[in-house]
Amino acid sequence: MVAAGMSHRAMDQALAGAGKVSSTGKPLAPAQVGRILQRLGLAGKLRGGDQRLVAAL
């Protein structure tokens, strides 16, 4: 989703559609998606090589 350039809002909607929720059982908010991406080191603009790396994950 990051490599595709999806917004945090689009990501949270896609995750909700797949049944993924927060630890409290509620749908993820866009801000939560952003924090998760930061923790994973996937936040911010990706360069070409980074996009290929993330796509491989």
Image (cartoon, rainbow, N blue to C red):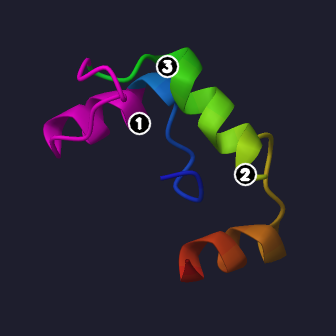
Q: Which mark is residue 42?
A: 2
**14 inside magenta stretch:** yes
The residues tagged by marks 3 and 2 sit, at their Cα atoms, a distance apart of: 15 Å
Q: Which residue is mark 1?
A: 11
**Quadrant of the rendered structure where residue 20 is?**
top left
Instruction: Give 1 or 19, whichever is nearer the viewer.
Output: 19
Q: Residue at x 84, y 62 (%)?
A: 47
The residues tagged by marks 1 and 2 sit, at their Cα atoms, a distance apart of: 13 Å
Label 3 vs 1, first from the N-terminus: 1
The amino acid type of the residue labelled 1 equals Met
Residue 31: horizontal and vertical position, in percent?
57, 17
The residues tagged by marks 3 and 1 sit, at their Cα atoms, a distance apart of: 8 Å
Q: Which mark is residue 30?
A: 3
Q: Which residues are magenta?
A: 10-26
Instruction: Give 5 or 31, whichever is nearer the viewer.
Output: 31
Residue 9: horizontal and vertical position, in percent?
43, 22
Q: Examine the rendered structure and indicate whether residue 38 appears above or below residue 28.
A: below
Circles 3, 1 touching at the beta carbon (< 8 Å): yes
Dot 1: element: helix
Q: Examine the rendered structure and indicate whether residue 46 appears above or below residue 27.
A: below
**Quadrant of the rendered structure where residue 10 is?**
top left
**41 inside magenta stretch:** no
**Quadrant of the rendered structure where residue 32 is?**
top right
Q: Residue at x 17, y 46 (%)?
A: 18
